[in-house]
Image (cartoon, helix red, strand yellow):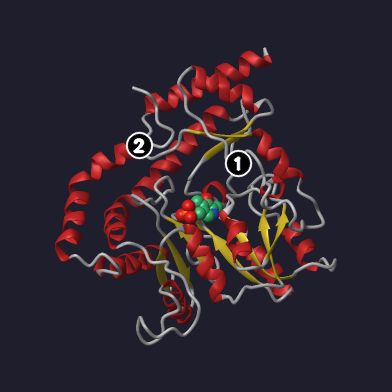
Amino acid sequence: MTMQFIDLAAQQSRLRAELDSAIARVLDHGRYILGPEVAELERALGEFSGAADVVTCSSGTDALVLALMALGVGPGDGVVVPSFTFAATAEAVALLGAVPIFVDVDEQSYCLDVDHVRAALADTRPGARPVGVIAVDLFGQPADYPALRSVADEFGCWVVADAAQSFGATLGGVAVGRLATITTTSFFPAKPLGCYGDGGAVFVTEASDAPLLRSLRVHGSGSDKYDNARIGINGRLDTLQAAILLVKLEVFAAEILERQRIAGVYSAQLAGVVVVPHVEDDRTSAWAQYTVRHRDRDRLADGLREVGVPTAIYYPRPLHLQTAYRDYPRGPEGLSRSERLAAEVLSLPMHPYLTGEDQDRVIDAVRHVVLLDDG
Ligand SMILES: *Cc1c(COP(=O)(O)O)cnc(C)c1O
């Protein structure tokens, strides 16, 4: 049996009967667009996270676009984003004609460095005026929202949480979805809570922010579908995907605990062999990825591939070095950590159905490759 990097089939076989009947129910009622499962999922996600309201949508990228549209982001606005993230974080900003301002991440958490954010917000060089910050909960650990909130407040800026990787995590006992006034997530199949296609959601802590998001999600609809109050997008979540997510949400809390247990085993066995992830004391991670660092990363990846252990690199190139983003401004503190991380990170197989046997194989292989190189 070849080992999977993320094993979606194991979860599916556990849930197959429930998934089949949930899908059949949608085929029976035929309400494919904004059917009853969509509202039911929004309620269930609100209950899970404690958010005041949840607006589901077509992807994690569209969740960011909807959040920024609701905040009125447009030309002339600057938005601070990390460079060490998936492109969608900066793309949503640029799509709206605003300017992403790239800032470095913290050495330990790989989330935005709060001091570097302050320096970028205080930066008076000509360019776009910062109006807000999008923090990314990289690999599943929430960014330092209390600190980001107070720095953003100093400059009259908002904070949006890009929680595409962290749904299911907590900070200070508070669930993702309630850590920023607007939080976005993704239900892309490989995310901790994934559907069978594209999907996403926007969480708000003020219920009064939800109607605007719901309008933007359906072409800026007003009193009905053919009354257009504003410019919006077609950003709905399919009823079928909502039905699938309702089934998966039933086991999600238990799956997160399994991810945390598996991460604990990796860290106990690999500390000192490679640089293992650091989760701050006040936080839990949803472990979208278990990412280690090693100075000879490519040799480690090759060695693991040779013995059938799949790995992935998130991310091989920071955004400020990508063709589409290299001309955007950078914060005054530079981006050296993002560049070094891109050269050193390696993500190991991580999913709630990873067997002890497979995990031992991964651990033995990492030790073997690293210790062989050192000795
Ligand atoms: C996956 C991801 C997104 C985009 O989500 P999609 O559903 O694929 O559009 C945005 N931000 C981050 C940090 C992600 O990991």
Residue 265 appears at what percent x and percent y? 47, 33
The quadrant of the image that shows the N terminus is: top left
Q: CA distance from mark 2 to mark 1?
A: 24 Å
Of label 2 and label 1, which has the lower sequence position?
1
Tell me the crowding category of disc 1: few under 14, some 14 to 19, or many 20 or more residues within 10 angstroms, Cα based.
many
Residue 43 visible? The answer is yes
When asked about the image quadrant of residue 30, the answer is: bottom left
Q: Which quadrant is home to the C terminus?
A: top right
Q: Which label number is shown at residue 315? A: 1
Instruction: Please state which amino acid type lies under the numbered disc 2.
Output: Tyr
Q: Which residue is mark 2?
A: 353
Q: 51 or 89: which is nearer to us? A: 89
- Tag 2 secondary structure: loop
Q: Are marks 2 and 1 in contact (CB under 8 Å)?
A: no
Q: In the orientation shown, which residue stands out farthest toward the right?
A: 125
Front residue of this view, candidates 248 and 315: 315
- Residue 213 placed where, x, y %? 46, 75
State which quadrant residue 26 falls in: bottom left
Which residue is more in the foreground, 169 or 248? 248
Which residue corresponds to the image point at 34% horizontal and 40% vertical from the top-left? 8
Residue 197 badge = none
Residue at figure coordinates x 48%, y 38% from the top left: 263
Dot 1 amino acid type: Tyr
